[in-house]
Amino acid sequence: MERPPAQRFQDLVAWQKGHQFVLAVYRMTKSFPREEIYGLTAQFRRAAVSIPANIAEGFKKRGRLDKARLMNVAQGSLEECRYYLILSGDLGYADTRSLLVDIDEVGKLLSSYISAVCHSVR
């Protein structure tokens, strides 16, 4: 059965999964070393929040170009977070394997959304 069109950004599975990713990043970075509070912790959280925030903003944009631009910003933030996950793991701050799987899922959902809504925009 096909899903009805989303009425609000919270209905988008990409936003829902992105929001869950943000919550997980906040939980994980709570245990980072104190000296990282203005470094990696702040950067990581900012980039994570940017993913669902740009999905939400793009959802209400009427033009496909505006919508596509914001979804692409979300994709860029997603890749920034992917690097922070790699770095956090390499520094021994956290086991990031499950979040790397989660971020892959968010990326696929976001790509599917972009294809469905902005298919003629490149």
Image: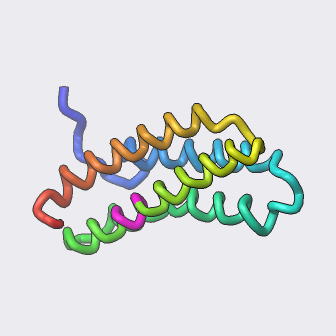
Q: Residue at x 34, y 49 (%)?
A: 110
Direction from residue 122 to residue 6 in the image, left or right: right
Q: Residue at the top extreme?
A: 1
- Residue 43 x/y as whole percent: 66, 65
Q: Residue at x 81, y 63 (%)?
A: 37
**Location of the C terminus (image quadrant):** bottom left
- Residue 42 magenta: no
Nearest the viewer among 23 and 100 is 100
Labels in figure, total: 0
For the record, the magenta segment spans 71-75
Magenta segment, prevailing SS (helix, strand or loop): helix
Nearest the viewer among 54 and 60 is 54
Direction from residue 90 to residue 13 in the image, left or right: left
- Residue 6 x/y as whole percent: 29, 48
Q: Residue at the front extreme?
A: 90
Q: Residue at the left extreme?
A: 120
Q: Quadrant of residue 57?
A: bottom left
- Residue 114 x/y as whole percent: 25, 55
In the image, is residue 110 above or below residue 53? above
In the image, is residue 72 above or below residue 117? below
